[in-house]
Amino acid sequence: MASITTKRMKQGYLMWMPTMPMVLLHAEHATESSPAKAIFRVLPKMTKHEVKEYLTKIYDLPVVQVRTQNYLGKRMRMIGKRQVVYAKRPDYKKAFVTFDNTLADTGLGCFVPGINTKGANE
């Protein structure tokens, strides 16, 4: 019993750090009729609540709704000279995130005055 408490004391305070990758696949800016939206590729074990907390606490984004879809990895068959080898890509999950109306621009693309204007080349 004493060994369990000493192990806990040696660990100190446990702090949760995000080690779950989120890859941005697609994003849409907000319009007058619809809020800003984004699609992320996440690990299959991530829940909707974890996606919302990740974006809210780390990136300070106003998340309203999170929807998820699970995808099975593609199955492949590679035919060689002597044998057939079967392989499978890893499973993944897509998270469809809807942001609050206060977020108008998702940050994709930038406009630099003087470079992107038509009058600069003339």
Image (cartoon, rainbow, N blue to C red):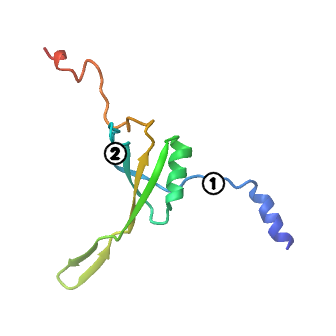
Q: Nearer the viewer, residue 25 or 12?
A: 25
Whole-percent x and y of residue 11? Answer: 74, 58
Q: Residues within 10 Å of mark 2 (few under 14, many from 20)?
A: some
Q: Is residue 90 above or below residue 28?
A: below
**Which residue is situated farthest in the right direction here?**
2
Q: Any mark on residue 16, and which?
A: 1
Q: Is residue 3 left or right of residue 106?
A: right
Q: Looking at numbered disc 2 in the image, what kind of residue is underneath it?
A: Ala
Q: Residues within 10 Å of mark 1 (few under 14, many from 20)?
A: few
Under tag 1, what secondary structure?
Answer: loop
Residue at the (70%, 55%) spot, across then down = 14
Q: Is residue 36 left or right of residue 58?
A: left
Q: Looking at numbered disc 1 in the image, what kind of residue is underneath it?
A: Trp
Q: Is residue 5 left or right of residue 108?
A: right
Observer-side mark, 1 or 2, equals 2
Whole-percent x and y of residue 42? Answer: 43, 58
Residue at the (37%, 48%) spot, across then down = 38
- How far apart are labels 1 and 2 at the CA level? 28 Å
Q: Is residue 55 left or right of residue 5?
A: left
Q: Tell me which corner region of the image, top left, top right, bottom left or bottom right, holds residue 30.
A: top left
Q: Which residue is mark 2?
A: 27
